[in-house]
Amino acid sequence: MAQEKVYPMTQAGKDKLVQELDQLKSVRRKEVVERIKIARSFGDLSENSEYDSAKEEQAFVEGRITLLEQMIRNAKIIQEDKETDAVGLGKTVTFIELPDGEEETYTIVGSAEADPFEGNISNESPMGSSLMGKRVDDEVAIQTPGGEMNVRIVSVK
């Protein structure tokens, strides 16, 4: 049997996934079933775009439920290591882009709760993996899809 992927995440990240799973099971699933019922009442299913759309949404919701259940089942809660000043899972890192000095701050999280728009980057992303283990004042070259980016770490919390 293949080993299932472990999903490192914060407790808050796991709680968020549990909340999303509950919402999908208790609300979205029922809404989709109702949409399918209504679409069936329109008659011929072979040319019924409402029915096709509702079935596609049902497949998406069921797929997401399965994925969330797997992520929650295989979650490994990150224990914050306050002893080290190195970048790691659960740590918030602030760096300055070189040479222009634009400052950015991100929290390093597991892939399950990564959301760059919320300031959470995955430890598996190019940026996250490049920063892992680095310390304040380290200069790091990060390979991004847009080319290489050089940064200097100014704080790790």
Image: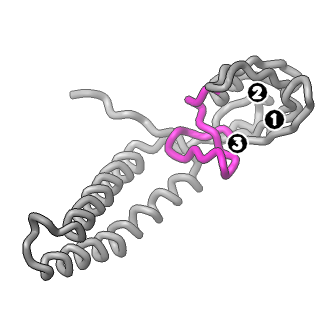
Q: Distance between the residues labelled 2 and 3?
A: 13 Å
Which residue is disc 3 drawn over?
107
Residue type (three-letter) at the residue carrying disc 1? Val
What is the number of the mark on residue 86?
2
Name the N-terminal-most of marks 2 and 3: 2
Q: How far apart are marks 3 and 1 (CA)?
A: 9 Å
- Tag in front: 2 or 3: 3
What is the number of the mark on residue 55?
none
Q: How far apart are marks 1 and 2 (CA)?
A: 7 Å
> Is residue 16 found left or right of 3 in the rendered image?
right
Does dot 3 land on a helix, a strand or a loop? Answer: strand
The C terminus sits in image quarter = top right
Q: Residue at x 35, y 48 (%)?
A: 67
**Number of marks present in the image shown:** 3
- Tag in front: 3 or 1: 3
> Is residue 100 found left or right of 125 in the rendered image?
right
Q: Which residue is drawn at 33% across and 34% down?
A: 4
Residue type (three-letter) at the residue carrying disc 2? Ala
Q: Where is residue 88 in the image (x, y as percent from the top left)?
A: 68, 31
- Do residues under tags 1 and 2 come within 8 Å of each other at their CB atoms? yes
**Front in this rendered view, residue 27 or 35:** 35
Q: Position of residue 134 (x, y in %)?
A: 76, 22
Name the N-terminal-most of marks 3 and 1: 3
Q: Where is residue 18 in the image (x, y as percent from the top left)?
A: 45, 60
Which residue is disc 1 drawn over?
156
Q: In this view, does 117 lie above or below 102?
A: below
Residue 48 picture quarter: bottom left
| Magenta residue span | 107-126
Pointer 2: residues within 10 angstroms few (<14), some, or many (20+)?
Answer: some
